[in-house]
Amino acid sequence: MHHDNYFLQNEKEIIHCVCVANRHSPTMFQAYFDNKFTNSLVYYVLLLLLLLVSPFLFIWELITTIRSRFQPIENMSGKVVLITGASSGLGELMAYEYAKRGACLTIVAIKEPESRLEKVAERACELGSPDVLFIFADVSKVDECRMFVDDTIKRFGRLDHLVCNAGIANLYSVNIDITKFAPVMDINFWGSLYPTHFAMPHLMRSNGKIVVNASCAGILNPPKGGFYNTSKAALISFYESLRFEVSPRVTIVILTLGFIDTNLITAKYLAKGVGVPLRNDFSRLLPTMGAEPCAIAIVDGVCKGATSITEPRFTKVLFLIKYFFPEVHHFYFSKFFRSKSRKNQKG
């Protein structure tokens, strides 16, 4: 009884201290932040501290990169991978990489006259996949997303990796009717969230992974990106938040890719959409990475346990420039990048 009273008394004292701290701490910080000088001082002190420890952070990043080369690779033999947007580009190439590792596949794409989905399925089987299910579906429709997840479970009985890759790109202009860009959000954002929602119970059971194809555009916000930038920023924000809720049972891998040499950055593709058309492919103007090396790096990183993948790697430097030197970032995009894009626009 004496011990019970002792612990009860101590518990009350701890609660009292916490309440006092919570009552005074916000006022203390608010005083710093409300004052223009101290508000700036706190920022520069923290920035200086970050610069001082940056060599150690760089070494840590280097060690992590080297260690990743020797990380055990997840054995995908017999496991099940569902990939959206798999009829071309990175989706197609990732399907081939998973097939080479012996995974069973469900590949999904919208039904179009030029769709190559069935041929992708055949090629995946030739490369080593034991079984491939191909499904035509629109990821912007919630019922169709439920359908292809259910069909995957009926066929294979499990799901290990969900690769949310489906997406479209249009160049935005204030002179174009804003309602015409609604499909960008529907496909790029909701087209990843819907399958994630229906796949989550199955991924929880298998301790699976979600791979979401965001973009460096969601962080760097290049000119004319408009709704494409917005959709990718929304993906990054949502899945970073979701990571805290489902980890460690489900691993979330966010891809922040730069310009990859796929059909999405071609003038021919962009001419089909509602946005600003181009004279030349982006690959002729800006540094791009080959689609196949990128797909190999993605699947290799996912199977080694990465939680974020940026390709080409130099893009990470641009992220740092944007956050620490925003004026430099703005100068580059407003002068160099925008001038090149303007010269490349038709009309």
Image (tube, rainbow, N blue to C red):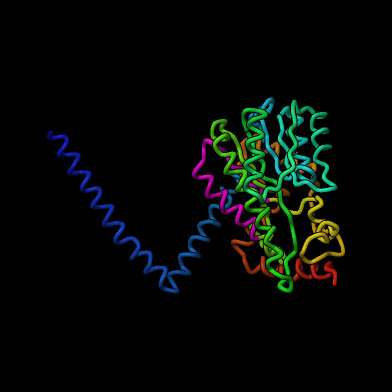
Look at the image and say whether residue 142 sits in the magenta stretch: no
Q: How many marks?
A: 0
Residue 209 in the image, given as x and y percentages of width and height: 60, 37
Q: Nearer the viewer, residue 248 or 199?
A: 199
In the rendered image, which quarter is residue 136 located in?
top right
Q: Is residue 66 visible?
A: no
State whether residue 247 is above or below residue 233: above
Q: Quadrant of the N terminus?
A: top left
Residue 258 in the image, given as x and y percentages of width and height: 72, 53
Q: Residue at x 67, y 61 (%)?
A: 182
Residue 179 in the image, given as x and y percentages of width and height: 68, 66
Q: Residue at x 81, y 37 (%)?
A: 118
State whether residue 172 is above or below residue 75: below
Q: Nearer the viewer, residue 20 or 172?
A: 172
Look at the image and say whether residue 238 sits in the magenta stretch: yes
Question: What secondary structure characterizes most of the magenta part?
Answer: helix
Magenta region: which residues? 230-256
Residue 175 in the image, given as x and y percentages of width and height: 73, 74
Q: Is residue 230 visible?
A: yes
Q: Nearer the viewer, residue 40 or 245?
A: 245
| Residue sitting at the far left | 2
Q: Quadrant of the C terminus?
A: bottom right
Q: Residue at x 70, y 46 (%)?
A: 165
Q: Residue at x 68, y 37 (%)?
A: 82
State whether residue 284 is above or below residue 152: below
In the rendered image, which quarter is residue 293 located in?
top right
